[in-house]
Image: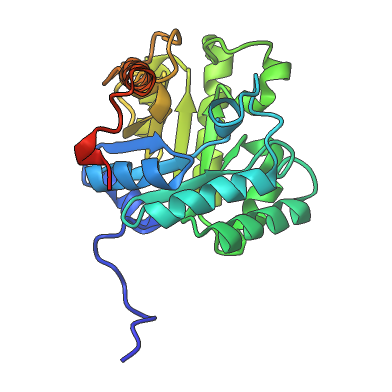
Amino acid sequence: MSNYLSTDKKKITATRFQAMKGQHEKIAMLTAYDYTIAKLLDEAGVDSILIGDSASNVMIGNNTTLPITLDQMIYHARCVANGAKRAFLVADMPFGTAHGDPKVALASAIRMMKESGVDAVKIEGGSVIADSLKIILDAGIPIVAHLGLTPQSINKLGGYGVQAKEEAEAEKLLSEAKLVEELGCCGLVLEKIPSNLAKRVTESISIPTIGIGAGNETDGQVLVSTDMLGMTMGFKPKYLRHFAQVGATIQNAVADYCNAVKAGTFPNDSESY
């Protein structure tokens, strides 16, 4: 009997993702860009994996997220989807794909869903791209919105500082959060805003909020996995906690390997055929 209509009860869908807020269950989200890391994160129990346009920095070495293309993002998202079977998979729509013609935005989002196998897309911005958000949602594509510090707007913002510190800005962000909820987005990333504002937003909307540099009153948290694992050595903003020092571990292991090769002790007899 074909199982093409079956539902994996373990899989976290957009509906389950939203329901976690009502169940008062905090959401743990991390980024991934490849099969191996995605599989490890998934099997460790992470609720959601973000294929972030931070791949532009982490995987390619660009200074900003702006250069990464839709084709590159689809490639990374497909790698993650191949490795993660349980987590809710969210892929960033890269710079320039959702901030112009809504029909182009829809075509880009459809490509992402069809070619990568993710569960949702993430799009930076609110009212200025409302038409694009609506047409994508109307096509049945779940969206996680993103407000506060929006790295794709870094040239306009003039840096990576904390956003919405003034009351007028805070009220505008709160209004934008309510708008993306009304449009039908299934979640909202809040980046680098005051914790008291993040709390206000979280309490004011029914969709889950995922914070990064937004305090602990959001419904969940997200970090770039290589940052959290201590692989981006020397990078330590206030909001980041290192849960491991994998960067140093890798360097030490590579140094030991090089020494063993040069000394002729690798491979030894038991490692040879």
Q: Is residue 47 above or below residue 14?
A: above
Relative to the observer, which residue lies in front, 4 or 269? 269
Residue at x 68%, y 24% (from the top left corner)? 153
- Image coordinates for residue 191, horizontal then vertical, percent: 48, 24
Tell me which corner region of the image, top left, top right, bottom left or bottom right, holds residue 46.
top left
The image quarter in which residue 9 lies: bottom left
Q: Is residue 83 left or right of residue 127?
A: left
Q: Position of residue 218 (x, y in %)?
A: 34, 29
Location of the N terminus by quadrant is bottom left
The relative height of residue 91 versus residue 220 in the rendered view (above or below) is below
Number of numbered discs on residues: 0
Q: Is residue 24 visible?
A: yes
Q: Residue at x 48, y 40 (%)?
A: 33
Q: Is residue 74 left or right of residue 270?
A: right
Query: As rendered, which of 148 and 245 lies closer to the eye?
Result: 245
**Residue 181 % position (x, y):** 49, 44
